[in-house]
Image (tube, rainbow, N blue to C red):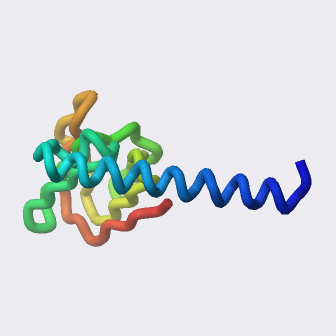
């Protein structure tokens, strides 16, 4: 396959992926399904700056008192703060407590 054809093929795959995602988004809205499940994205609930719940996560990459990195279906999530700890962890949810200073998404 020549380089221009590879590039064209890659563009076609990206376009198809985007069309599929748009279809899934419309379908979740019409059927009133939870987007975090159908689209494989995390659902985040934050209460003040002291409690943080992540649903639909993939795993923990880094864990410390000042930084926690979590793998999600859309990339990494980095939580920074003071006295961070994991209060509860299940296969679907993770609850983080402590003084949360920042939240960053890394794709």
Q: Taking 1 as reference, is 49 left or right?
A: left
Determine the residue positioned at 46% across, 44% down. 61
- 59 or 98, which lies in front? 59
- 52 or 10, which lies in front? 10
Q: Taking 61 as reference, is 28 left or right?
A: left
- 81 or 43, which lies in front? 43
- 32 or 102, which lies in front? 32
Determine the residue positioned at 11% across, 46% down. 32
Determine the residue positioned at 17% across, 44% down. 34
Give coordinates of residue 31: x percent, y percent.
Answer: 13, 43
Q: Is residue 89 above or below residue 84?
A: above
Q: Taking 66 as reference, is 4 left or right?
A: right
Q: How many marks?
A: 0
- Residue furthest out toward the bottom: 101
Give coordinates of residue 53: x percent, y percent.
Answer: 18, 49
Give coordinates of residue 10: x percent, y percent.
Answer: 69, 55
Give coordinates of residue 105: x percent, y percent.
Answer: 40, 64
Determine the residue positioned at 17% across, 52% down. 29
- Residue furthest out toward the top: 91
């Amino acid at each position: 396959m020549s380089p221009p054809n590879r590039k064209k093929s890659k563009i076609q795959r990206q376009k198809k992926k985007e069309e599929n995602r748009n279809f899934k988004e419309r379908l979740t809205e019409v059927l009133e399904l939870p987007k975090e499940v159908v689209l494989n994205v995390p659902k985040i609930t934050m209460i003040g700056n002291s409690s943080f719940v992540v649903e639909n996560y993939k795993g923990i990459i880094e864990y410390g008192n000042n930084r926690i990195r979590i793998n999600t279906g859309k990339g990494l999530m980095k939580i920074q703060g003071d006295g961070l700890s994991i209060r509860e962890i299940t296969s679907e949810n993770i609850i983080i407590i402590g003084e949360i200073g920042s939240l960053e998404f890394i794709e």
